[in-house]
Amino acid sequence: MVATIQIPIDLRDPRVTTLAGNAGWTVVGLTAHDVGVWQFVKDVEGKVYGVVRLPVNIAGTPNAKIKLVIMANATSGVTSLDIGHKAVQTKAPAESLNPASLTYIGVQHITVPATAYNALEVSFTVSESLATEDELLVEIFHDGDHASDTLAVNTLLFDALLEIDIT
């Protein structure tokens, strides 16, 4: 029997070598609580990197998606996001954790909800082959200087998950 599970992606760091300051960790004060989020600065490119270990019981050819939960302190506008990823085998024979490139899924232009800070789930289908216990390197890319990105405030990333089929 095949079931679908969600695994949190361990978001570790923003890109700093070429995009320093365009993404980072921040705390937002909401009405009843404060919440830590990754923030992508408006109108510029920003990237956040993470990793998730694939389970031992993934289905033979699993359906896999990366799901992001985003929000913004705005009631209109479009934010542009993409996902880069690379599955790396860590068991013998192991592969390099320094791949030459990532596979990009394709930019999505996402209209924010009409209420400020409303959660919005965005889904990206993983396009490469995955194997048991691979480490999936993940890059979340905010294409803030894209012509379709009209959001007048920063894009806030609340959560990132890998949704995958298991047996």
Image (cartoon, helix red, strand yellow):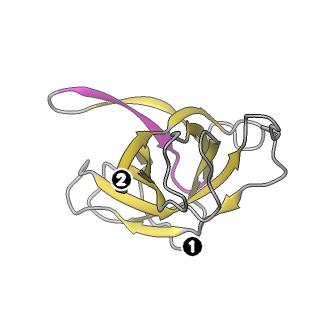
Name the residue carrying label 2. 4
Amino acid at pointer 1:
Ala
Q: Earlier in the sequence, mark 2 or mark 1?
A: 2
Rendered view: 106 above or below 93: below
Asked if residue 36 lies in the magenta stretch, the reply is yes
Q: Is residue 70 visible?
A: no
Can you give x and y, in whole percent of width and height, for residue 15 in the image? 68, 39
Name the residue carrying label 1. 147
Q: In this view, does 68 lie to the left or right of 18?
A: left
**Is residue 59 or residue 66 the one in the foreground?**
59
- Residue occupying the point 59% across, 69% down: 106
Can you give x and y, in whole percent of width and height, for residue 42 in the image? 51, 52
Local SS, label 2: strand
Amino acid at pointer 2:
Thr
Can you give x and y, in whole percent of width and height, for residue 17 in the image? 77, 37
- Residue occupying the point 81% across, 46% down: 99
- Residue occupying the point 49% across, 55% down: 59
Q: What stretch is highlighted in magenta?
A: 33-44
Rendered view: 16 above or below 5: above
Local SS, label 1: loop
Rendered view: 84 above or below 56: below
Give the quadrant of residue 75.
bottom left
Q: Is residue 164 left or right of residue 45?
A: left
Q: Do the residues labelled 2 and 1 touch (CB within 8 Å)?
A: no
Q: Mark 2 and mark 1: span between their CA atoms?
A: 36 Å
